[in-house]
Image (cartoon, rainbow, N blue to C red):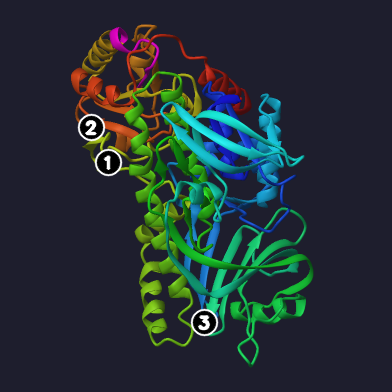
Amino acid sequence: MQRTQVLIVGAGPTGLALAAQLHRLGVACRIIDKHAQVLELTKSAALHSRTLEYFRDLGVVDRIVAEGQRVDILDLRTGHRDRVTVDFRTLGDAAYPYMIDIPQARTEHILIDHLTDVGVELERGVTCTGIKQTGDGVAATVTLPDDSTDTIHADWLVGCDGAHSTIRSLLGLDFVGDAYADDWVLCDGVVDWPLPRNEMTFSSDSDGIYGVFPLPGDRRYRLAYTQNRDANGELVEPDIEDAQRAMARTGIEGTIHSVDQFWTFNLAHRQATSYRKGRAFLVGDAAHVHTPFGGQGLNLGVGDAMNLGWKLAAVANGRAPVDLLDTYEEERHRVGKQVVSFTHLGAQAMLLRGDPRRHLRDAVMGVLQSSPAALRQMARRLSQVAHSYRNTSTVTGRVRKLRGGDRLPDYSLFDGVANHNRRLHDLLPSDRPALLLTGQGNVGALLSSARQMLDALRTSHPNTLAMQVLTTDWKMSTTAPEDIPVVLDRGREADELYGPHPTAYLVRPDRHLCYVGPPAVERIREQLAMMFTAETGAYHGAHEASASATEGRRR
C-alpha cells in the first residue's frame, strides 16, 4: 500500500494548479489521470485576471502571459449591433487588467512543465475505480496502465476529474441541474476577422449564438456557436461551410480559411449538492458545470483549487484545526452557485431568438452600456476579482467599501523615497496569513499599533503571521524601527484602505480578508485562531523565494 498526504484525481488545469499549490506549501501529493497524455482538444481558452494572480503565486504567469493573446475587451452583440462593451482595462486594482486567451492544452503543458521542474511526477494512464474512507484517510483503488490494480492510501483525496467525475459518483453526491436544448460547436482555425485582436465578441440573433475569440498565432481564432439544425430539425454536422454560414449571426463579415477540428458537445448547468464527503473533496468541473458565457469555467475551478489548497496544506502540516476545511464548501459552493446562475441567465438572455422579450433585453443592455459604474462592475464580476466570501463563518469587519471576505485590492504603490512602484500583493506572503496595518497623518499612532501588534502576536504565532505597514507619510518610511516593515504609498493609490485611524487587515494566503477593522489585538488573535493553531516551527520560505523572483523580474 502506497501512502501520500493528498491524492489528486484528474490532471486538468484545476488538478495541476492544486498540485502546484500543495507542493509549494510543503505537502506531499500525488496526481493521477486516466488519460495517457494531454488531450489536445478545443476546450477552455480564457484566463481571467484573478486566475492570473493565482498563477503568479504559482510561478507560471510570466510564461502564460508571454505565450497567450491579450484580450482587453468583451463585446456583446445582439441583432447585429454592439450592445455592451466590457473593458477589462478598468480593473484599477489588478496587476492583470485583461484576459489572456490561450488554448487549455497549452495551459496544462505549462503547469506540467512547472511540476516536473519542482519534482512532482504526473502519473498517466491511472484510473481511480474505488474509494474506501477510514478514520484517518482514504484508500483509493486504482487501475494502472498494464491493467493491474493497486491501492493508494492518502490522508485526503480531491476529485478534479471533470463533469463526468468518477469521484463524485463513488462518493454518491448528486449533481443537480438541467441540460440545455442547444448543442454547441467549437473549433480553432485561421480566420480573417476585421475587429482588433484585443477584442472578443459574443453575438446572437434569431438563429443562435456565435463567439469569436482571438488566440495566439497569425489570424488564429476560436469559434464557438450553437449547432445548426436542418429543415427536419436534425443537427447539422459542422464543417467550414456550416461555420461560415453561422457567422452571419454576428453581422460582421469574416472569412474562415481553415479549421483544425470540429467538436460538438452538450451543455448543462449543474452543481454538486456538496463539495465534500468525509476526507474527499470535489473541485472544478467535478463540482459545477455551466455555459461558456464569459469564459468562467476553468477560472472557477482554479479558484476552487487555490481556496482548498492553502487550507489543506495548513491542516496537513498540523498548522490549522481540521475544522478549517469546512470553510471550503461554505465559501466555494456559494461562489459556484453564483457563477452557474450568472452564466445561465447570460446564455438564456442571448438565446431569446424570436422571443418578444429580446426587445426588453436590448433595452436593458442599452442602460448597462450607458453606465460606466455598471460596466466596471461587470468587468470585475467576469474577471472574478469581485468574488467574495462575505458573511461566512471565519470573516468579519468592514472599513469603507471593503468587508471581511473580500479580495484585497492589488494596487500599484509608488514609493516616493525609493522612487519605484511595487504591487501590494507582492509585499504580502502567499503561503501564510499577513497583517496589513494602514494609516496616514498620525505616524505615532500607527507605529504604536504596529509595535503592539508585533509584540503581542509574536507570543502565539511567531512564524505564522507576517506583518506589513502601509502609509502615505514619507517620514515614517525612514524612521520606523527595522523590525517593522514599512512601505510608502506616496501616490495614494491605496486610498480606500485608509481610515481616519490606523486600520488592520488580516489577509489570508489567498489574498482574501478575514478581518477588517481597528487594530485590536484580541480580536485579531480570535480571527487568526480560526485558521491557524499556535506555531511550532518555521515556514519553509515559499513566499520569500517567490517574492525574490518577482522582484527580480520587475527590476
Residue 75 location (% of width, % of height): 53, 66
- In the depicted view, which residue is nearer to us: 538 or 201? 538
Residue 32: x %, y % from top left: 64, 38
Q: Earlier in the sequence, mark 1 or mark 2?
A: 1
Work out which quarter of the rendered image holds the N terminus and state it: top right
Question: What amino acid is found at the position of numbered circle 2 in the picture?
Answer: Gly
Q: Where is residue 299 in the image (x, y as percent from the top left)?
A: 52, 48
Observer-nearest of 334 and 449 = 334
Q: Quadrant of the rendered structure where residue 378 is? A: bottom left
Circle 2: is it few (<14), some (14-19), or many (20+) Cα within 10 Å?
Answer: some
**Distance from the alpha carbon under mark 2 to that under mark 3:** 48 Å
Residue 371 vertical placement versus 511 (above, below): below
What quarter of the picture does the C terminus occupy?
top right
> According to the image, label 1 marks what residue?
392
Write the residue at 36% across / 60% down.
Answer: 374
Residue at mark 2: 499
Q: Which amino acid does label 1 sit on?
A: Thr
Labelled pair 2, 3 in contact (Cβ < 8 Å): no
Q: Which mark is residue 79?
A: 3
Check residue 56 for magenta coloring: no
